[in-house]
Amino acid sequence: MIGQAALSASPVRVRAGEVPSFEGGKGGRRLASVRLRAEIAFARAAGRLSRLAGRGGGTTIPGKILATVDPAGLGKLARRLPLGSAIVSATNGKTTTAAMVAEIVGDRVELAHNRAGANLVSGVASALLAADGADLGLFEVDEGAFPDVAGRVRPQAVCLGNLFRDQLDRYGELEHIAERWRGAVADLDPAAWTVVNADDPLLADIARGRAEAVRFGIDDPSVARERLPHAADSKYCRTCGAPYDYAAAYVGHLGDYRCPHSHEVRGGLDVAAKSIELTGLQGSSFDLVTPEGTRRISLSLPGLYNVYNALAAASLSLVLGAGLDDIEAGLGRFRAAFGRFERITAGDRSLLLLLVKNPAGANEVVRTLVDAGAPARLLIALNDEIADGRDVSWIWDVDFEPLIEALQELVVSGARAEELALRFKYGGLDPAKIALVPDLGAALEYGVETTPAGGELVVLPTYTAMLALRHIASEQGLVRPYWEEAVG
Amino acid sequence: MKLVVGHLYPEYLNIYADRGNIAVLERRTAWRGIELDYRTIGLRDTVRPAEHDLYYVGGGQDREQALVAPDLAAKGPALIEAVEAGAAFLAVCGGYQLLGNFYRDRSGAELPGIGLLPQHTVAGERRMIGDVLLECELEPGDARTLAGFENHAGRTYLDEGAEPLGRVVSGFGNNGQDGFEGCRVAGAVGTYLHGPLLPRNPWLADWLIARALSRRLGETVALEPLTDDLEASAHAVSSERARRRGGRF
């Protein structure tokens, strides 16, 4: 056993007042103080109002009000969870990883989970407010907010997936985030579990010295890349500055690395994926090798990046006390978090939404599309709101080039559609093949209309463009709004 | 016709999509039938001033910049000689800082620069982040605008009488105070603007290419115009962003 069994072995709902705590003792649920209860009611009402007012899902407003009324409220609410909390953070895959964990453990315990992706302090507080009677907190947390949220929530386990360059205008440089993470991890409860992607040298370094750590990674050179992508980060030894030698590079700078002077090596893994089979857009399967045994896992999500997400989810679930049966079944059942790999039927055609938000993630989306047979038509939507990153220069660090040869038409859309047009023009795509349609609704309509009957239009939106496109699709009755999806 | 481009430290200094600037130089020469010979210049490589017509250096994270700074110091005299002999040079962000006289960090310690551009940089507390719009006049009577994005903590100050790249219309610029952005000496230009800079400001790409060709051929060269509709649209949107939400203290 690498984890303490916090979840009961049989699917019995944990009863208030009789719950096993993470420390293995018995902890009763504390009654909310009168003041806190009043604040909760007030803040919840605001969430309903926000939905009624049509301003989105009300997924952060209750939490913002709580933070205003009672800045210590988040910590108080978190301490009421009998099984404590687990936090998932990463540049890429945190929403998917947390949703996978929810699928694995959700039958056995009631979760407070910010599954709609509101992942700042306010979103975590809102999830806690909305989940009265929850046993376990499961929070995906923005990488910039991780130190703050971890300090307030005092999690029993953290799962750190990866750090890639992302939104430099908002987060600053990678090293700066890493330093803040290092401090946050050092401040965790000594008994808290640190689940870490050992294939990321920066994270392996952060987790070094933690007593309770699980190191996961990929061990299958047959799926390695020939070389590091253009925008690879963290590729120099943190001790001596020499470029790492890679026995295998899997996603971005993640891989089986070794400093040529042996200062830092990837080393052994506690949880590993082996014998990986990638089957285009259909999904993948792999051997999940753990100290408790090996299982063949089937995922309906494509791409090696989702194998990493599954490894992270399996490792975190293990320390939360889940068994391999639950992990195998939960991952097998799992369907993508909204917008991440979502098929939407539009009459006799369909849309395939794949969120893109930074070079490392977009590179994997491109690689997955190309492996499945590069599409002839593509819609890409680039916005520049705060949630997308106001600096759009990242699109030049994405290796879009493998898509260009097969492209017959590229529809570019969003507030910065022209920048995308230039990215592809200077990448070598004939400008005559570029349709510039900045308005998202018009672009979606044009893209669907020009897709052959029975065909599929691949759509790569940035975060706010994805929300806007789903909103347009929901107004047309094609999908449910994301906050319904999140609770449904 | 052939141009030789030397890209300094592409493995280390590439954080703000610098390859977009290189792609623009490559395409805009190719579309005009000019061969572009792209060469990288790495750590411990020797710069021979006669070799390259155009140099490029981008930005990096602090760690990467610290890794290349001592090496760049050794290359400094050759790079200055090359610019004096007519080579064009574009330096962005961290690369721009490294070409100045010195960089003073928060502890007060000074790291020497190579002194190619008459400016120095002092580390600041608050980062200057946002869209930027500049007015430039690199050739007398030829007023232009540059639209980009800046993200820097260093405050750069020009020496007395030094020529900026442009005047800030919106955004912070070199230091958020004096209204200047960038620095220019002959065919060498340093700037904080990334985004990348050249795709939506193709006139600057053409200015650099023309300077480099003039060096190669020993005579002034006029480039044939290209269709720049998409570039102009992107420039307009980026300029609007800067006017609406460019940074200020």
Image (cartoon, coloured by chain):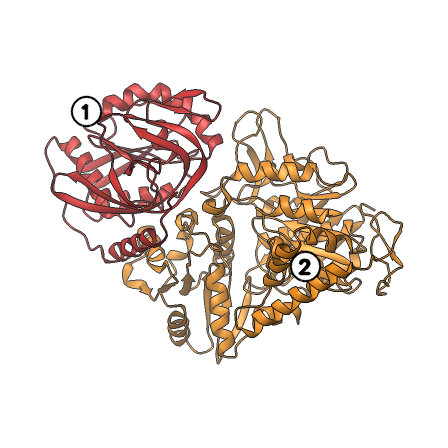
Chain colours: A orange, B red
Residue annotated with mark 2? A100
Q: Residue at x 34, y 32 (%)?
A: B96
Question: Do discs 2 and 1 belong to a common subunit?
Answer: no
Position of A477 relative to A28 (above/below): below
Amino acid tagged 1: Ala
Q: Nearer the viewer, residue B155 or A252?
A: B155
Helix or strand or loop: what does disc 2 sit on? helix
Could you tell me residue A285's position as x and y percent? 65, 57
Could you tell me residue B232's position as x and y percent? 24, 55
Could you tell me residue A429's position as x and y percent? 32, 56
Position of A282 relative to B4 (above/below): below
Residue annotated with mark 1? B85
Rendered image quadrant of residue A280: bottom right
Amino acid tagged 2: Met
Q: Residue at x 89, y 59 (%)?
A: A18
Q: Which corner quadrant holds the N terminus of chain B?
A: top left
Q: Nearer the viewer, residue A297 or B193?
A: B193
Could you tell me residue A463's position as x and y percent? 49, 59
Q: Which corner quadrant holds the C terminus of chain B?
A: top left
